[in-house]
Image (cartoon, rainbow, N blue to C red):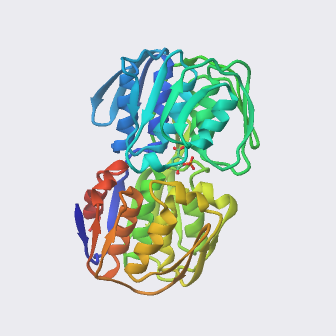
Amino acid sequence: MIKKVQKSRPLKGEITIPADKSISHRAIMLASLAKGKSIISNFSSGQDCHTTMNIFKQLGVKIKQIDRKTIEIVSDSILKPANPSSYFAGNSGTTTRLLAGILACQDFDSTITGDKSLSKRPMKRIIEPLTLMGAKIDSTEGKLPLNIHGHKLHGITYTMPVASAQVKSAILLAGLKAEGNTTVIETAQSRNHTELMLKHFGADIKTDKNKITLSPSELTAKNIEVVGDISSASFFIAAGLIVPNSDITIKNVGLNPTRTGIIDIVERMGGGISIINRKNISGEECGDIKVAYNDSLKACTIEGADIPRLIDELPIIAVLASQAKGTTIVKNAEDLRNKETDRIKCLVCELNKIGIDIQETDDGFIINGGKKLTGGVEVESYCDHRLAMSFYIAGLICEKEISINGFEWINISFPEFETQINALK
Ligand code: S3P
């Protein structure tokens, strides 16, 4: 589907963004592994999380959608799949990697498959640590499909070679049923939703600085209200800052410090962002974010420990940086090449087309910002939801209309995206 986007009038008002995708996936998984009845409220409307939900239904868990955003899960904590036990994870890396950890320690065999994009993504990063725990996983050169032969596992101590919450979570979820303790050591902290939620469901898990230790645990059902997704909010943060005379309040946004890199970057750029109504919901911090147009943004460098805290926001940060005076440098972000697409290559190619001065580097990109965007071209989403939404926001400030090919991919995380933008116009 081709979406045409024109220069926008100011965006003003209040919006609510969809529930956090990472937390929604984990809520389905942990409630399915826990004994009893859990209610998940404000569940994500994105396709990826519905993929996870459908897989756990296939795994024999009683999952009922009570209304659009409320899910009831009743489980006796044991997965009992119907045959054949092959699970289609669609476009979702989180589903695949976390599920692999859960399936590795079951007493049945399973297969995980995915769409074209997911089938190209690296799975060695989970196969290696899970194999060290005793898992038996076959793949084709570290890619999907994964054939998992359920096996008894034992705990390990694992130092993460890449900062990845998916890898960390796969290991911890496998550790729930392993013999002995499982310890993960992180060199750069990735999002910690799995650790927080495991604690919420009663697991014996401790975090000491960068070291997480989990003892084998039984989980007990718990209700979870999912906070809003800061990754979805980031498109509105950027739009509020770069569309002239905008003023937006984004309600109920998750503010877990392992995810708030985008807020730090806006502050580094001199953007001005305020947070009100701070609270804690189901173990996660959240609050309302207020942003307004700012015509004196300045460039900055984004690197090192910043990266895992804003990895999914880098495409929209590139659009934001195009309006900041000076040279913005993004370094140490080579893992962006392993996302739904090679996000460095595709982002640079398409943003150049609309008039952004951006150059690709091995591990990131360099933007000379502060210039008007010409637009007047068609850009490609590469079947990547975050690229499609980033280009849409860029389109709101282009001199001439742009067309985005493959815009329907926004449904992966944010089906209500355009309705929400229109509500602010
Ligand atoms: C996620 C972790 C990140 C992120 C992805 C969601 C998660 O991936 O990019 O969108 O829910 O754990 P990595 O673990 O590969 O960094």
Quadrant where the N terminus sits is bottom left
Q: Which quadrant of the view contains residue 266?
A: bottom right
Q: Nearer the viewer, residue 393 or 79?
A: 79
Q: Residue at x 49, y 61 (%)?
A: 342
User: Residue 137, how many percent across, how many down?
Assistant: 57, 30
Q: Residue at 60% of width from left, 42% of height from top? A: 124
Task: State the image coordinates of residue 226 (x, y, percent, origin top left).
Answer: 44, 39
The x and y percentages for residue 186 are: 72, 45
Give the quarter of the image for residue 212: top right
Residue 40 coordinates in the image, percent (x, y): 41, 30
**Residue in the foreground of this view, choosing between 389 and 40:** 389
Quadrant in the picture for residue 290? bottom left
Instruction: Residue at 47%, 58% (x, y): give it.
Output: 289
Question: Which one is nearer the viewer's eye here, 377 or 318?
Answer: 377
Q: Nearer the viewer, residue 81 or 136?
A: 136
Q: Quadrant of the C terminus?
A: bottom left
The correct choice, above or below, for 351 with respect to 2 in the image is below
